[in-house]
């Protein structure tokens, strides 16, 4: 049965179901059954008790300080913005505490706060900042207004039966209904798209609709506005098209249908997947509680369960999300969105014991039925270690728009994790970084992705919004570990063009513990240029930790300028080639990100290998690359043309080929040794790689090798035009005959 038919059947089923919406309050997230059991179990479950006490401490302090509902004025990070954000967070907790304790002081606080908003809201026009494609009233953008309503609807649900009928009528007439209408009817460009913004809007309208038993709002939340008059070329603040190809669908089910791949990968990347999961799982829990006949957690083969499992795997060994596309570094699965997600998916998604170990690290649970279930399971000792894995997550609603690959090798202090981005553009938050990769060890980033240029909620930095440098640097190709052609970003730096294409996964094999490999192609980033990259993690007892082999082939019918940056973090220690430093460090270009790079040194290798080594986090790192004596080897640093010091001044190593039609970049990356700052001893401080070679390179086959200082040799041969795992190949290289089956052949040193 086609997806469209399934969708139509679901619309008819939900619309005609004889099952009434649950009338009893609380019913949205917390239920009466859950309230009674929480009261009974509170003193028996330490994690639940701790989470309860944290809420009490926060809310009691706010009650003591008194209610503040200022007239909206500030951008993100400003006083009024932060005050309204704190108000909705505290109201939600106060409502829950009222249900658990029956202390009317909490209900009075929620009621009085809501009455202040009901008094103010009818007097508000659009937010005075006037900086958003979809301005809110309380906040500078509707996205934050939707956040407010998602949380506040939970508070209203908890005090609903305690309020008088007159109080409810006033709140719904002067606040909640016009609030929901502004998010939706008044703002179709915000509400009727497929995007994380709209997910928040759909959830907000639907959740308040459930509390008020307003079937019109619930239907609007499920399926969007029937008409929106959005122009085909209309864009948001990030340059993303609002009217995407989604068959005219909108609403919550459209978000589920188009934002996720069948594997649960979210097209904007893990940072925004984390942010969007809160409205996804909270509204899903509300649907499950209020309209269980929908079976929302079974939709698209249990998509929401897969989405959380995938999201948790998109983290490094320390639980930090990989900063793909527009992403702020430091965000982890300790965030409040993931606390909710882990609890809800554990409770409604099959009680995976691995999730309990994540919840333990989070150190808190939701004060609802799902949090109760998690706290009980942990107290009973049911938790198991959460196992992260190598995976190749398909992108696109149909799973046919590229993939995000993750390779993990080693354990504990020896772990190395590789992330290769072979996905679609990622809409307006996407970066121009086809076939890029980032590398992590147990201490964090080794070869980083820059992420986004933004300081969220820091008012001094453009009101906490995306900085100008996000477009001029962070999104540009040279800001990533991938090939740049002719100094121009992929797709000319045009999001509209990038959205039309995706990279093509070539093969992925993580079946062998000691050798994992991923390969992909990109033929659309530059007209007439074909790019093919293969990355392998190799574990061998002769190396202290796994090593990374990088093979990047670029082909064109005409002469091009190719360059490959490797961004790194730490202090450069040495190179094996001579370089010159300019007396005055100047910017390296005028556009495509080069205006933000300073050339610090450049040189050329006397032979066919170049090596750099650096120190970071008391550990040594080295890159050894196959080069030509004509290659220009550049040491550069971010920070040029940055008058407001918005960019992190981090280093990079660039291999710049002389103009040619075809090029091959081959490198080996090592993590080795350590430095003890107390004893001042350096251990294994030097690279063990003595040579990297390009043995053979044609359209059909590429062969590379590398050797250590003891002349042990490893060889990798790639079949460039046939990825069939059953195909047989034969190739003679320097008098040696190689035969193998499949897309690659790896020969380990004896």
Image (cartoon, rainbow, N blue to C red):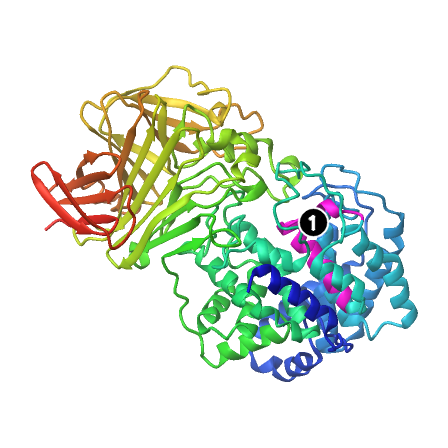
Residue at the image position 46 percent from the left and 49 percent from the top: 322
Toward the right, the furthest residue is 166
Image location of residue 560, percent across then percent down: 36, 23
Toward the top, the furthest residue is 583
Vertical position of residue 419 compared to residue 156: above or below = above
In the picture, measured across the screen, residue 566 lies left or right of residue 642, that is left
In the picture, measured across the screen, residue 386 lies left or right of residue 53, that is left
Is residue 208 a member of the stretch shown in magenta?
yes
- Say which residue label 1 marks: 143
- Image quadrant occupied by the N terminus: bottom right
Residue at the image position 72 percent from the left and 74 percent from the top: 17
Where disc 1 sits, the SS reads helix
Is residue 734 a member of the stretch shown in magenta?
no
Vertical position of residue 386 compared to residue 715: above or below = below
Image location of residue 195, percent across then percent down: 62, 49
Segment tinted magenta in the rendering: 186-210
In the picture, measured across the screen, residue 289 lies left or right of residue 363, that is right
Toward the left, the furthest residue is 735
Vertical position of residue 674 compared to residue 363: above or below = above
Image location of residue 568, percent across then percent down: 37, 37
Q: Residues within 10 Å of mark 1 (few under 14, many from 20)?
A: many
């Amino acid at each position: 049965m086609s997806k469209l038919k399934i969708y139509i059947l679901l619309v008819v089923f939900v619309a005609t179901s004889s099952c009434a919406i649950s009338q009893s309050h609380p019913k949205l997230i917390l239920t009466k059954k859950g309230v009674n059991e929480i009261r009974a179990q509170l003193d028996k479950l330490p994690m639940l008790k701790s989470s309860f006490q944290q809420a009490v401490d926060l809310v009691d302090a706010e009650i003591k300080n008194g209610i503040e509902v200022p007239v909206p004025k500030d951008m993100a990070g400003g006083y009024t913005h932060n005050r309204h954000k704190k108000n909705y967070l505290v109201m939600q907790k106060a409502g829950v505490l009222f249900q658990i304790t029956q202390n009317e002081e909490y209900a009075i606080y929620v009621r009085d706060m809501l009455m202040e908003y009901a008094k103010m809201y009818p007097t508000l026009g659009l937010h005075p900042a006037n900086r958003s494609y979809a301005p809110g009233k309380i906040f500078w953008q509707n996205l934050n207004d939707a956040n407010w309503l998602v949380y506040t609807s939970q508070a209203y649900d908890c005090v609903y039966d305690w309020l008088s009928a007159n109080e409810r009528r006033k709140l719904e007439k002067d606040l909640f209904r016009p609030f929901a209408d502004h998010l939706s009817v008044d703002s179709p460009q915000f509400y009727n798209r497929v995007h994380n913004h709209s997910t928040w809007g759909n959830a907000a309208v639907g959740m308040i609709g459930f509390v008020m038993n307003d079937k019109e709002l619930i239907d609007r939340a499920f399926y969007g506005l029937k008409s929106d008059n959005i122009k085909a070329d209309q864009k948001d603040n990030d340059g993303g098209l609002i009217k995407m190809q989604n068959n005219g669908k909108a609403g919550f089910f459209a978000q589920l249908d188009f934002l996720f791949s069948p594997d649960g990968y979210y097209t904007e990347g893990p940072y925004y997947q984390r942010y969007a999961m809160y409205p996804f799982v909270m509204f899903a829990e509300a649907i499950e509680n209020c309209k269980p006949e929908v079976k929302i957690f079974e939709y698209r083969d249990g998509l929401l369960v897969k989405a959380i499992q995938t999201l948790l795997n998109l983290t490094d060994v320390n639980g930090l999300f990989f900063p793909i596309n527009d992403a702020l570094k430091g965000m982890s699965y300790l965030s409040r969105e993931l606390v909710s997600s882990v609890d809800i998916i554990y409770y409604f998604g099959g009680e995976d014991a691995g999730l309990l170990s994540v919840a333990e690290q989070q150190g808190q649970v939701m004060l609802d039925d799902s949090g109760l279930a998690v706290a009980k399971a942990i107290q009973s000792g049911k938790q198991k270690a959460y196992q992260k894995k190598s995976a190749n997550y398909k992108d696109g609603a149909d799973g046919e728009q590229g993939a995000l690959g993750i390779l993990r090798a080693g354990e504990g202090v020896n772990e190395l994790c590789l992330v290769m981005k072979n996905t679609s553009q990622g809409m307006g938050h996407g970066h121009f970084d086809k076939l890029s990769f980032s590398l992590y060890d147990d201490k964090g980033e080794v070869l980083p992705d820059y992420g986004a240029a933004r300081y969220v909620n820091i008012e001094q930095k453009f009101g906490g919004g995306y900085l100008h440098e996000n477009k001029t640097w962070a999104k540009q190709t040279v800001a990533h570990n991938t090939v740049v052609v002719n100094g121009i970003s992929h797709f000319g730096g045009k999001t509209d063009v990038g959205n039309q294409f995706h990279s093509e996964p070539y093969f992925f094999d993580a079946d062998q513990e000691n050798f994992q490999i991923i390969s992909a192609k990109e033929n659309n980033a530059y007209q007439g240029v074909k790019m093919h990259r293969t990355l392998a993690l190799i574990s061998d007892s002769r190396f202290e930790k796994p090593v990374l082999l990088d093979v990047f082939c670029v082909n064109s019918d005409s002469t091009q300028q190719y360059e490959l940056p490797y961004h790194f973090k730490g202090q450069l220690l040495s190179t094996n080639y001579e370089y010159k430093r300019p007396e005055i460090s100047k910017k390296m270009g005028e556009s495509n990100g080069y205006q933000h790079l300073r050339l610090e040194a450049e040189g050329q290798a006397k032979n066919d290998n170049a090596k750099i080594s650096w120190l970071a986090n008391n550990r040594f790192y080295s890159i050894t690359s196959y080069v030509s004596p004509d290659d220009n080897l550049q040491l550069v640093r971010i920070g040029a043309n940055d008058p407001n010091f918005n960019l992190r001044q981090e280093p990079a190593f660039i291999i710049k080929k002389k103009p040619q039609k075809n090029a091959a970049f081959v490198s080996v990356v090592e993590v080795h040794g350590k430095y003890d700052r107390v004893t001042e001893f350096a251990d294994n401080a030097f690279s063990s790689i003595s040579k990297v070679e390009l043995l053979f390179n044609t359209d059909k086959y590429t062969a590379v090798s590398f050797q250590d200082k003891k002349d042990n040799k490893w060889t990798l041969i790639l079949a460039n035009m046939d990825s069939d795992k059953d195909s047989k190949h034969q190739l003679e290289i320097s008098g040696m005959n190689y035969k193998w089956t499949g897309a690659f052949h790896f020969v380990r040193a004896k």
